[in-house]
Image (cartoon, rainbow, N blue to C red):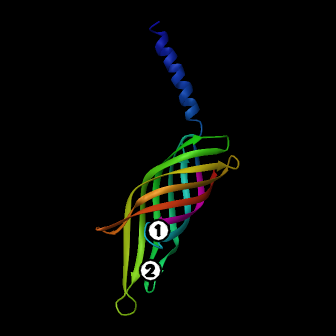
């Protein structure tokens, strides 16, 4: 009996790991991102690429790189996103055959360009801020290679100076191709 229990446990564990480890693949995609900082009229948009490695149907590691496509301006003052880069762990759970709910957690770094001062006293500042980002999303598989996704993330707080902090939210739409 004592020999049967470890043997049974080993067989059960091996069947579980073989089903979990069955899906190693790379994916590459494109994304469009709408961001909102909790200040009046601070809406930023970015476009970029997504690359990831899917260990199995439940876990992946993903990186995103985006560049700003719109920003905020008032008179001679302007704020624009230069780049956003992130590295995240993606945990998925299948809801239906084609739909998966997923969570993202990782590190995001944003570089912001600020200009102002007009002709008399012009200035340019590049502000870089990074930290923990997390969110939820929904993935729709069109077929085995292509899928569409939408997610909502909370990005690191916007803190251009130490006494000023506002929350930063992001909604991303995109498409991925699996190899």
Going by the picture, which residue comes out furthest to the top?
Answer: 1
Name the dominant secondary structure of the magenta segment: strand
**Is residue 28 shown to the viewer in this render?**
yes
CA separation, marks 1 and 2? 16 Å
Residue 140, position in %: x, y?
65, 49
Going by the picture, which residue comes out furthest to the bottom?
Answer: 120
Please tell me whether residue 54 is drawn above or below residue 120 in the rendered image. Answer: above
The 10 Å Cα crowd at callout 1, few under 14, some 14 to 19, many 20 or more, is: some
Tag 2, which secondary structure? strand
Is 29 covered by the magenta stretch? Answer: yes
Residue 101, position in %: x, y?
57, 45
Q: Going 49% across and 49% down the picture, which residue do you hit?
A: 104
Q: Going 42% across and 75% down the picture, which residue do you hit?
A: 113
Residue 92, position in %: x, y?
55, 43
Q: Which residue is the site of mark 2?
A: 78
The residue segment tinted magenta is: 27-36
Left or right: 171 with respect to 78?
right
Q: In the image, which is nearer the foreground, mark 1 or mark 2? A: 2
Please tell me whether residue 127 is drawn above or below residue 97 in the rendered image. Answer: below
Residue 38, position in %: x, y?
43, 66
Picture quadrant where residue 116 is located: bottom left
The 10 Å Cα crowd at callout 2, few under 14, some 14 to 19, many 20 or more, is: some
Please tell me whether residue 157 is drawn above or below residue 3 in the rendered image. Answer: below
Q: Going 40% across and 89% down the picture, which residue do you hit?
A: 118
Among numbered discs 1 and 2, the one appearing first in the sequence: 2
**Is residue 179 shown to the viewer in this render?**
no
Q: Which residue is the site of mark 1?
A: 83
């Amino acid at each position: 009996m004592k020999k049967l229990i470890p043997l049974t446990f080993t067989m059960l564990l091996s069947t579980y790991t073989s089903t979990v480890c069955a899906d190693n693949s790379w994916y590459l995609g494109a994304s469009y991102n709408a961001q909102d900082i909790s200040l009046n009229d601070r809406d930023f948009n970015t476009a970029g690429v997504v690359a990831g490695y899917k260990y199995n149907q439940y876990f992946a590691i993903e990186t995103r790189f985006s560049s700003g496509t719109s920003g905020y301006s008032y008179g001679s003052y302007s704020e624009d996103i230069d780049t956003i880069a992130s590295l995240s762990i993606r945990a998925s759970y299948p809801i239906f055959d084609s739909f998966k709910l997923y969570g993202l957690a990782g590190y995001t770094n944003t570089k912001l360009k600020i200009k102002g001062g007009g002709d008399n006293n012009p200035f340019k500042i590049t502000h870089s801020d990074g930290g923990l980002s997390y969110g939820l999303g929904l993935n729709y598989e069109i077929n085995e290679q292509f899928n569409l996704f939408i997610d909502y993330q909370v990005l690191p707080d916007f803190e251009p100076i130490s006494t000023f902090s506002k929350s930063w939210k992001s909604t991303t739409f995109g498409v991925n191709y699996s190899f």
